[in-house]
Amino acid sequence: MHTTFATIDGNEAVARVAYRLSEVIAIYPITPSSAMGEWADAWSASNHPNLWGTVPSVIEMQSEGGAAAAVHGALQTGSLTTTFTSSQGLLLMIPNLYKIAGELTSAVIHVAARALATHALSIFGDHSDVMAARGTGFALLCSASVQEAHNFALIAQAATLAARVPFMHFFDGFRTSHEIQKVQLLEDDDLRSLIDEELILAHRTRALTPDHPVLRGTAQNPDVYFQARERANPYYNACAEIVQQVMDRFGERTGRHYQIYEYYGASDADRVIVLMGSGCETVHETVDYLNARGEKVGVVKVRLYRPFDVQRFVQALPKTTKAIAVLDRSKEPGSAGEPLYLDVVTAIHEAWELHNEIKGQGGQERQGDDENVYTPHTPHTPHTSHISPLPLIPTPKIIAGRYGLSSKEFTPAMVRAIFDNLAQPQPQNHFTVGIHDDITNTSLTFDPNFSTEPDHVVRAMFYGLGSDGTVGANKNSIKIIGEETDNYAQGYFVYDSKKSGSMTVSHLRFGPKPIRSTYLIGKANFIGCHQWVFLDRVDVLKDAVSGATFLLNSPYDADTVWKYLPEKVQQQIISKQLKFYVINATQVARESGMGGRINTIMQVCFFALAGVLPQAEAIAKIKQAVEKTYGKKGAEVVRKNLQAVDRTLENLQKVDVPRWGDGEMGRWGARGPHFVGLG
C-alpha cells in the first residue's frame, strides 16, 4: 500500500479528512480552530473535490450559533455536514447540539479544545469547553497527537454513520492544533474502505422532504417525553462497540491500531494514570523512562469519553493496580470532582462491587495475551455458574488531579511527581500540578530538572519577533526535515497573544523515532537568538545544555562581539562550553533588499550548523521552499530571498570563546575572541 508522509499541524490534519468527507461546511472563526475553516474555504474556492467528486459548500456565518443552526439545517436535508469551533464558540452551539443529538442525527464536529472565559479570557487550550458540552448527547472522541487527530477525523465519521450518535471529535487547542508533526496521510482509498455507502444512503433517507413527510421537532408533554427520551438508550449502549469495531477496521487497513481505552505500561503495574488528550503522550514517554529504571507504572489513554463504557474501561486496567490518579484538564468549582475523575470512580465502584458480589458465583478472565488484565462483569454481561470463582481483588485507591489549564505546561517531571504521590500511603487527593498553590495548598512539588528527553533527539529553540519571519522559516525547516529525511519532526511555536511585534519562541525537535514530547523544550542543544535586544531582556541560554550551539544575529562581528555581550551571557557561554556563532543577518537582509525579514538567512545558518542534511543539499531544499513560499508574491521577492541564501554562509562566523581567567584586559581576557571561520 502506498504511504505518503506530510509534515503538517493538527488543524490541517483534521481539515484534510473533514473536507473530503463533507458536502456542507458551516464555519465561523475562533482561535485556535480557525485554520480548519480557512483550509476548507480555500479548498472549496479552488474547486477541490470531496471523496465523491463534488465541491463542498463552505459558508461563513455571522456567529457560532448561526454556524450550528446551519449545520442542523443541512443535516436535516440529508447532507454530510461539519463545522469547526472552540471555547465560547462551542458554548454558543450547545442548543443546536442538543437538537442534533436528540434527533439521532449522524454528524461530526471538530473542536480545538480551549479554555473558557471565566475570571479572564484565555485563547489557550484545555478541556473546559468540551466538558461544558458533555451533556448534549454528542459522543466525545479525543485525539492525543497530530497523527491521531488525522485518523480520528475518519473514525468519528465512520462511527457516527453506523451509530446515529453525533460525534464531537476534540483535541488540545494549540498543543495539538498548532503543533507540526510528521504524519502518515490517509489516502482516498483509506476513507472509502471505512465509509459505508449504504449508511450514507440511510442518512439521506432520514432527510426531511415533502416526498416522504415525517413528524419531527414536536412539543411533548409529561405523558410521553420521558419515555421518548429513554428511547435513545439502545443507540448509546451500542456506540462504544461500534467505535471499537471501526478502530479495528482502521487498524487492519492502516496498521495503526487503537483502543477506546488503551493501557500502556508494565503488565504488573501498581500505579496508573488515567487521562486524555495530548498529555497522554507525555505520560507515555515518562512511563517508558520510569519502567526502564525498575518502576511498575502505566497509563490508560481515554479516547472515547462519551458514551463512557464502564466494562471496557475496567478491562484496560492491570489487575495489579493499587492506586490510580485521574487527571482532568478542566476545573468545575464546587464539584465533588472533575468530570473524568467522577466517571472513573463510578466505573470502578460499580465494576468492583459487582465482582465482589458474584465472586463466589464465578468471574471471567479476558481472553488475550495479557493475563494481568481483569474483566469484571457488568449488568449487561450475565455470568454463568460453570465459570470458576475469582479471588477478591481489592478496589484500587483513586485520586484526582488537575493539570494544564490554559495550556499550562505538563512535563515528565510533573508526571513523575504524580506517580511518586501515588506511591505514598496516603496520597494527596484533588491535587494540582504545574503551579504553586500557596492559598489552598493543592499543588504537588516536582523536580524541574528531571528530564526524559533521549540523546538521539535534536532539540532546537529559536527566539524571534512576531514580525521577523522566524516562525515561518522554522515551519519550513520542520517540513524539510520531516519530508526530505527519515527523521520524525515536531515544531511548536509559543506566541504572545498580542502576536505581531511580540517575542516568539520556536521549539523544534527531530530524531529517528516518533516524538511524544508534547511539552516545551527544557534542555536544548541548539539555541538561535534572532534579535540582539533579547540578550538583556530574556535568559535565552538558560535551557542550553553543555556543548550546545548558540547562533546569534549580531550587529558586531566575531572579533568584537564578545565585549558587547551581557556578562551573564558571557558566563553561560563559557560555563556551558557552548559553540558560538554570529551573523549580521539584519545587514545581509537589508543588502539583499529584504528589509527586516531575516528568517531565510537564519534558516540557512541553522542547517549549516545543525548537520541534519549535507550543506549543499540543505541549501537546495531551502531554495525550493523559498520558491514555493514566496512564488505568489512575485519573481522579485523570490530573487531577493535566493540572493540572501547565497550570501549567508560567507557572513556566518564562529567566535573563539576565551577560557576563564585569560588575562586582565576586558571582562574575559586580553586575547579576546577571534574569527575562526567555517573552513
Image (cartoon, rainbow, N blue to C red):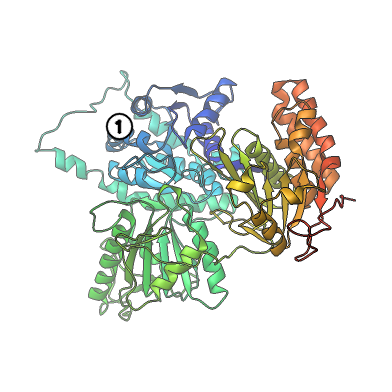
The extreme right residue here reads: 679
- 617 is higher (above) or lower (below) than 459: above
The extreme left residue here reads: 223
Q: Relative to 615, is 369 on the left or the right?
A: left
- 193 is higher (above) or lower (below) than 402: above
Disc 1, SS: helix
Residue depicted at x 55% and y 68%: 288
- From this viewpoint, is residue 170 visible? yes
Give residue 51's position: percent from left, percent from top: 55, 31
Give residue 56's position: percent from left, percent from top: 50, 24
**Tag count in the figure?**
1
The extreme top residue here reads: 210
Image quarter of residue 100: top left
Residue depicted at x 43% and y 49%: 142
Give residue 471's position: percent from left, percent from top: 63, 39
Q: Relative to 210, is 473 on the left or the right?
A: right
Give residue 361's position: percent from left, percent from top: 26, 77
Towards the viewer: 162 or 139: 139
Q: Which residue is tagged 1? A: 96
Residue depicted at x 40% and y 41%: 122
Q: Amino acid at mark 1?
A: Asn
Q: Relative to 360, is 83 on the left or the right?
A: right
Towards the viewer: 438 or 26: 438
Towards the viewer: 279 or 388: 279
- From this viewpoint, is residue 318 visible? no
Q: Relative to 457, is 208 on the left or the right?
A: left
Towards the viewer: 677 or 665: 665
- 556 is higher (above) or lower (below) than 437: above
Q: Residues within 10 Å of mark 1 (few under 14, many from 20)?
A: many
